[in-house]
Amino acid sequence: MPNGSGGPSCQRALCRQRELRRISPSHPRTNFNGRRARIMAEVWTMIIEMRTYKIKPGKRSQFLDIFGSKSVPAHTEIGMKISGPFLSVEDPDTFFFMRGFPDIASREPMKAKFYEGELWKRELENILMPMIEKYEVVVVEVPEEQVHWSWAHDMHEERVRPGGVDIAALRALLDELAELGRQHDARETEHSRRMLNVTPETGQFLAMLVRATRAAQILEIGTSNGYSTIWLAWAARDTGGHVTTLERSPDKAAMARANLQRAGLADRVTVREGTALDTLARLDGPYDLIFLDADRPNYLAYLGRILPRLRPGGLLVADNVVSHAGELREFLHALQNDPGLDTVILPVGNGEALTYKKP
């Protein structure tokens, strides 16, 4: 893939690179094609590149086939870790993946080994680069002592993880809830009664962020039936963390508790009922990661109560920022114009705003 380091590929005006320094969990510290993902390794990693690609019309299938069959194996042979691809629901020609390195010192030598190798120079560069319309690279630095990334998951290859979680049963439950949610929402005419679950792609993305940052205190605004909560709690079990989730509907809160019990994750979650604005006022924090997926007209009001409760170096993830960009224009403007924040829009699911609170 293009190197994203300001070299010849970036000089072609295809690439925009940003760096988010230190995602640290201590204080004064589409359409997802899941069956194509694989468990590659569990790795202590300091540098993560979040890479978004816009492919020229008609080239997506060819690009992804070559990416999966040749580029990914070449990366992993060198020691880099690849998670993805995540395909955008809004734009089928846009996809997102993550590339990881063991530490700062190894990043440039590993990239050089890939881009100076025969496979890239003699084959992949000439095939892949002409298919790319543009791309963006966000570089995240994570403290070595805190990072533990379980790279992308085909959970059918693993039956039970330490801690007693039955992976196959949990995957089946998530598939069941996703399908039931789709069927329910297709029938239900009242918006407030719909489940409005995140996409499976977004669920996995959230779990990856929790694991990558070793988030211990996690806040979710908008529980619904607990689908996204299960993704967060599953990862929180791996990090020793806890999820607090807010839901205004007593019926949905009861449904979420039952589903968390089925998932074997009820001990990792506190479900709090009531309007989110009122409940937020009673929460102290700080939280390592906050996920916002509630009533969109209140996103801007939520932001005023979320940011004081997000620790310095913490992450805020806001859902639906691409699918409902017009409705969330003021909210996005507030995120992108706050000097204390760094925000990037990722084409995951319905579009995620990933915001880093600067220390």
Image (tube, rainbow, N blue to C red):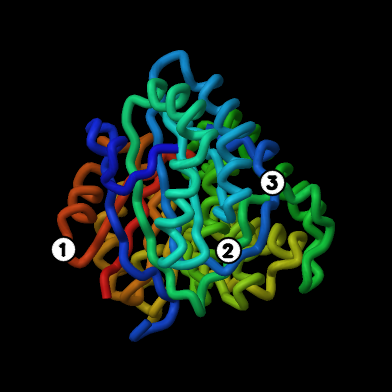
**Secondary structure beneath label 2:** strand
Q: Looking at the image, which residue sits at the far top?
A: 58
Q: Which mark is residue 339?
A: 1
- Name which quarter of the figure residue 354 lies in: bottom left
Q: Name which of mark 1 and mark 3 comes first in the sequence.
A: 3
* Amino acid residing under circle 3: Arg
Amino acid at pointer 2: Trp
Tag 1: Cα neighbours inside 10 Å, few (<14), some, or many (≥20)? few
Most foreground residue, 66 or 148: 66
Residue 326 vertical placement versus 166 (above, below): above
User: Residue 318: where, in percent of width, then height?
Assistant: 38, 52
Mark 2 or 1: in front is 2
Q: Is residue 130 among the parts visible in the rendering? A: yes
Q: Tell me which residue sits at (56%, 48%) in the image.
A: 82
Q: CA distance from mark 2 to mark 3?
A: 14 Å
Q: Position of residue 103 (x, y in %)?
A: 47, 67
Give the Cα separation between the discs numbered 2 and 1.
29 Å
